[in-house]
């Protein structure tokens, strides 16, 4: 995913050999390599900031969804308990009607 934006691997940095000049390493070669390292570090920082932003947004979404789930569960429990009470009232009415029929009470 990000490999096309990153030029160097840790192994590349570890195995980098510079050629010697009369006074030591060739400054242009070292500067060019360090420019690549800086570019990669900058890209890594950009990627990290983007990922941190995504994580923050996902956590906020997750918290909102968890809150919504809790509310919906409460509503469901409330509806179930109220439907049970309605069912109980219906059952009592039916029982009363059956008693009238069975026992022949016409009140």
Image (spheres, rainbow, N blue to C red):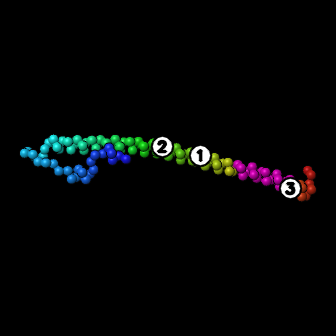
Q: Closer to the camera, 81 or 37?
A: 37
Q: Earlier in the sequence, mark 2 or mark 1?
A: 2
| Region in magenta | 82-98
Q: In the displayed orientation, state which residue is furthest to the front.
A: 4
Callout count: 3
Residue at the disc numbered 2: 60
Inter-mark Cα distance, 2 to 3: 56 Å
> Residue at 17% of width from left, 44% of height from top?
30
Residue at the disc numbered 3: 98
Inter-mark Cα distance, 1 to 3: 40 Å
* Residue 71 tag number: 1
Which quadrant holds residue 100? bottom right
Q: Earlier in the sequence, mark 1 or mark 3?
A: 1
Give residue 94's position: percent from left, percent from top: 82, 53
Give residue 96's position: percent from left, percent from top: 85, 54
Secondary element at tag 2: helix
């Amino acid at each position: 995913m990000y490999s096309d934006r990153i030029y160097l691997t840790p192994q590349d940095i570890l195995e980098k050999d510079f050629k010697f000049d009369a006074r030591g390493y060739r400054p242009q070669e070292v500067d060019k390599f360090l420019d690549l390292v800086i570019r990669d570090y900058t890209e890594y920082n950009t990627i990290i900031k983007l990922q941190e932003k995504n994580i923050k947004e996902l956590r906020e979404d997750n918290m909102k969804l968890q809150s919504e789930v809790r509310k919906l569960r409460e509503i469901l429990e409330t509806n179930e308990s109220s439907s049970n009470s309605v069912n109980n009232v219906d059952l009592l009415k039916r029982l009363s009607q059956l008693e009238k029929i069975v026992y022949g009470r016409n009140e």
